[in-house]
Image (spheres, helix red, strand yellow):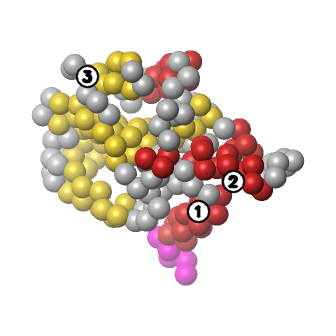
Amino acid sequence: MSILVEQRLADSPYIETVMQGQAVRDGSAIRPAEYCWHLVFVQEHGNLHPLVVGPWTTAGVAAWQAGGEILWIKFKPGVFMPHLPFHHLIDRETPMPEGVGQSFWLKSSVWQLPSYENVETFIDRLVREEVLVRDPVVTAVLENQPHDLSPRTVRHHFQRATGLTQNQIQQVVRAQQAATLLEQGTS
């Protein structure tokens, strides 16, 4: 394998998973469609490259270079940054301005690079500073909880908080479930 990856669940209602990886040699892999967005921090040759990676509506190729270290923070559906509209993030990797050393700029402030171990503390700070918010309507709808909102209102919440429609998210979920079944040998 050309990249060694460690992944864990998070103790945060905002985070789906946290992953860290180290590229032992150049490589690439097929990246599936993804309805969640990520903060990604790549360190190569002493330089930090912070990225906001939007939801991917199609599969593609992810590539990396030997020696790079990567930290991924995958957010739950409905978690978003109000100052970064999703129409700028869909199907894109958007670089964030780099700071000095192990820091970067986000919403007019300098932030220190989180570690794999302290991601929850970093996210809690983003929430306290209102850089990161969560839309409870999206969570409720995806968990099939009852609500009394009109379909138009629900669509608005999904567009604002995910950049996708509820149907687009359901399509990606079904495709991911099918891929898992195929990997397990089920037709």
Please give the label number shown on residue 99: 3
Please identify the quadrant where the C terminus is shown.
bottom right
CA separation, marks 1 and 2? 11 Å
- SS at mark 2 in the image: helix
Q: Nearer the viewer, residue 25 or 163?
A: 163
User: Dot 2, crowdedness within 10 Å: few (<14), some or many (≥20)?
Assistant: some
Residue position marked by numbered label 2 in the rendering: 155
Q: Is residue 60 left or right of residue 11?
A: left
Above or below, 21 relative to 101: below
Across and down, in percent, residue 45 comes to 12, 34
Residue type at numbered disc 3? Gly
* Residues drawn in magenta: 181-187
Across and down, in percent, residue 48 comes to 23, 31
> Going from the N terminus, do you reach mark 1 or mark 3 first?
3
Q: Nearer the viewer, residue 94 or 128?
A: 94
Residue 129 painted magenta = no
User: Dot 3, crowdedness within 10 Å: few (<14), some or many (≥20)?
Assistant: some
Residue type at numbered disc 1? Gln
Residue position marked by numbered label 1 in the rendering: 168
Across and down, in percent, residue 76 comes to 57, 43
